Image (tube, helix red, strand yellow):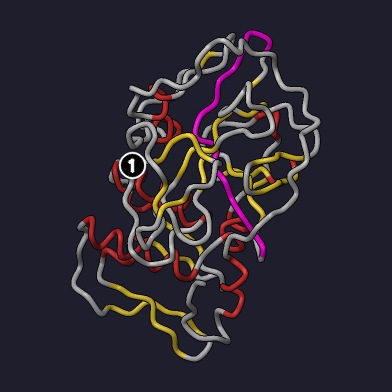
């Protein structure tokens, strides 16, 4: 469970953790027909787009170089068959993922569902040196700008007020960036992230969009790739972390194994993922 700075100020932080959804119904969505004889997984591929081939008749659309979509589509993956590791080194054996993102996590129970999504967003902006774009809102509404952290400022609580105070030397090392992200993970989550995002129509689903339910229980998954066919139908890939903190994983589609790991964007009412069921209206974007 995540920590709080003061019980009074951050009491709702406990609402941020991922929970367990038990709704495992079969989707009523009309998924596109695919050639079940075509392999959609290339075990030799070491990035998301080289590991996963689009379904028959679908193609990836070009994305801008150095965009967030380009970053997600080229996420590095661990070798085929790798198992997800929890923060404490234990292995996740649940049959819910087809690949593991090759990105280290700390040995603290912090990087859960929404945190993994914020980590991807932060890593992208850090990689392109867009430091002023790295900003996340904590559960109490306090805006955590990385540029403040770079200047040596740290969050201080005085009663019910949260303020910046300079207590460290200015620095922009990757270690300091990771310390910033760990602080965000401690005091932000699905509740705060959901409030920071904007509603999105599933027909317009794009790389980087997020299915999210904020609260307790709550969960979030991120769209990491999209492909489209000649008639405009879309399919997409999903990534998640979960509770307890664990490596980010590319999800299977256990309700349509012929299409898996891709999901159809023809969502009638609900999106059924292996560990959570989302309402179609819970799709959001940055």
Question: Could you say which quadrant of the image residue 263 lies in?
Answer: top right
At which x and y percent is residue 224?
A: 50, 35
Residue numbers of the magenta segment: 217-231
Which of the image's four quarters has the C terminus? top right
Asked whether residue 223 is drawn in magenta, I would say yes
Q: Residue at the spot x=59%, y=44% of the render?
A: 210
Q: Which residue sits at x=36%, y=29%?
A: 47
**Residue 189: x %, y % from top left:** 54, 62
Residue 131, magenta (yes or no): no
The image position of residue 254, as x and y in percent, is 64, 34
Classify residue 149 by image quadrant. Answer: bottom left
Label 1 sits on a secondary structure element that is loop
Q: In this view, does 244 lie above or below 94?
A: below
Query: Overall secondary structure of the magenta stretch?
Result: strand
Residue 106 left/right relative to 185: left
Q: Please tell me which residue lies in front, 280 or 67.
A: 280
83 vs 132: above or below: above
Image coordinates of residue 26 in percent, x first then y, are 77, 35
Answer left or right for 136 relative to 192: left
Whether residue 60 is situated above or below residue 86 in the rendered picture:
above
Crowding at dot 1, Cα within 10 Å, few <14 / some 14-19 / many 20+, comes out as some
Q: Name the residue under label 1.
A: 102
């Amino acid at each position: 469970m995540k920590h709080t700075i003061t019980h009074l100020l951050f009491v709702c932080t406990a609402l941020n953790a991922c929970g367990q959804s038990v709704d495992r119904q079969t989707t009523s969505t009309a998924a596109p027909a695919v050639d079940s004889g075509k392999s959609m997984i290339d075990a030799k591929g070491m990035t998301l787009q080289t590991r996963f081939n689009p379904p028959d008749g679908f193609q990836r659309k070009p994305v801008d170089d150095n965009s967030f979509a380009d970053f997600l589509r080229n996420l590095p993956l661990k070798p085929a068959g790798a198992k997800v590791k929890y923060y404490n080194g234990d292995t996740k054996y649940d049959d819910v993922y087809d690949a593991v993102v090759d990105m280290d996590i700390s040995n603290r129970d912090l990087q859960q569902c929404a945190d993994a999504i914020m980590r991807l967003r932060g890593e992208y902006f850090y990689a392109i040196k867009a430091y002023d774009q790295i900003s996340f809102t904590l559960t109490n509404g306090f805006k955590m700008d990385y540029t403040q952290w770079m200047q040596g400022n740290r969050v201080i609580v005085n009663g019910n007020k949260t303020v910046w105070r300079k207590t460290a030397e200015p620095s922009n090392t990757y270690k300091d960036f990771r310390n910033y992200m760990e602080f965000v993970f401690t005091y932000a989550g699905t509740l705060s992230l959901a409030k920071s995002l904007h509603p999105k129509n599933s027909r317009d689903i794009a790389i980087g969009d997020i299915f999210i339910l904020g609260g307790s229980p709550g969960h979030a998954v991120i769209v990491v790739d999209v492909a489209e066919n000649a008639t405009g139908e879309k399919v997409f890939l999903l990534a998640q972390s979960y509770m307890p903190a664990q490596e980010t994983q590319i999800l299977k589609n256990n309700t349509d194994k012929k299409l898996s790991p891709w999901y159809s964007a023809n969502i009638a009412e609900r999106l059924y993922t292996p560990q959570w069921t989302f309402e179609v209206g819970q799709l959001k974007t940055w």
